[in-house]
Image: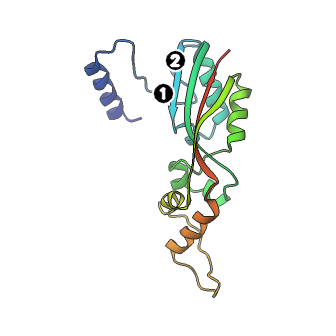
């Protein structure tokens, strides 16, 4: 978050009259929060941006009180090609850093969470994937059946068709014992 975003959030909190809400600037791998001091952790599509997901899961467990709960929304993906994983723009678009649902749940389990439940799931189709792929300047060229290099758009359509159904947004609930 930028300083400007934090200022806007603080202004909204002030305007709302809430007294038990605060905004802190920090890294997701090193939360600026005391051990066992938080009742709830809510995250909306941020963890996939961290290259150290296990560390993030451990941080969430560290700051939650016993019985504390979390609700995480994030992108998960199966079998991503290496060019997507290494694409800076697709990493920033939340796809390149996505791990599988199984890896995600295992990471949370390894950090001590219980009662893990995927409460919602939305699978991305070809058009949604194409929107992400088209944002990348790193779409590898492809040859057509005729041996000619496909246009960037045609290559993006090809890759999007391959990834359709393999990228999802999930919502996971769990708690710390």
Residue at 53% in and 15% down: 38
Q: Position of residue 123 (x, y in %)?
A: 58, 50
Q: Is residue 32 left or right of residue 147?
A: left
Neighbour tally class for label 1: few under 14, some 14-19, many 20 plus, Cα within 10 Å: few
Q: Is residue 93 left or right of residue 66?
A: left
Q: Can you say which quadrant of the picture contains the C terminus?
A: top right
Q: Position of residue 27 (x, y in %)?
A: 52, 30
Q: Residue furthest bottom?
A: 146
Q: According to the image, label 1 marks what residue?
A: 26
Residue at 61% in and 30% down: 56
Q: Position of residue 142 (x, y in %)?
A: 61, 75
Task: Work out whether 149 lies above or below 171.
Answer: below
Number of numbered callouts drawn: 2
Task: Work out whether 12 lies above or below 51.
Answer: above
Q: Position of residue 154 (x, y in %)?
A: 53, 74
Residue 174, image quadrant: top right
Q: Is residue 62 left or right of residue 127?
A: right
Q: According to the image, label 2 marks what residue?
A: 33
Neighbour tally class for label 2: few under 14, some 14-19, many 20 plus, Cα within 10 Å: some
Front one among 22 and 124:
124
Q: Can you say which quadrant of the picture contains the N terminus?
A: top left
Q: Give the spatial CA distance, label 2 vs label 1.
A: 9 Å
Dot label at residue 48: none
**Do residues under tags 2 and 1 come within 8 Å of each other at their CB atoms?**
yes
Q: Residue furthest left?
A: 15
Q: Earlier in the sequence, mark 2 or mark 1?
A: 1
Residue at 62% in and 18% down: 62
Q: Is residue 158 left or right of residue 19?
A: right
Local SS, label 2: loop
The colour scheme used to paint the residues is rainbow
Residue at 67% in and 37% down: 104
Local SS, label 1: loop
């Amino acid at each position: 978050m930028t300083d400007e975003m934090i200022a806007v959030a603080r202004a909204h909190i002030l305007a709302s009259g809430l007294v038990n809400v605060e905004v802190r600037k920090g890294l997701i791998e090193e939360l600026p929060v005391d051990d066992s001091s938080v009742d709830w952790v809510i995250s909306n599509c941020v963890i996939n941006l961290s290259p150290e997901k296990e560390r993030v899961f451990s941080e969430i467990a560290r700051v939650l009180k016993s019985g504390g709960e979390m609700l995480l929304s994030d992108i998960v993906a199966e079998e991503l090609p290496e060019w997507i994983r290494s694409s800076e723009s697709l990493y920033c678009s939340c796809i390149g850093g996505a791990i599988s649902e199984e890896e995600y749940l295992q990471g949370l389990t390894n950090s001590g969470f219980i009662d893990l439940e995927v409460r919602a799931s939305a699978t991305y189709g070809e058009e949604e994937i194409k929107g992400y792929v088209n944002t990348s300047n790193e779409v590898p060229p492809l040859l057509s059946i005729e041996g000619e290099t496909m246009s960037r758009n045609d290559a993006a359509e090809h890759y999007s068709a391959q990834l359709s159904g393999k990228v999802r947004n999930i919502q996971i609930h769990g708690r710390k014992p």
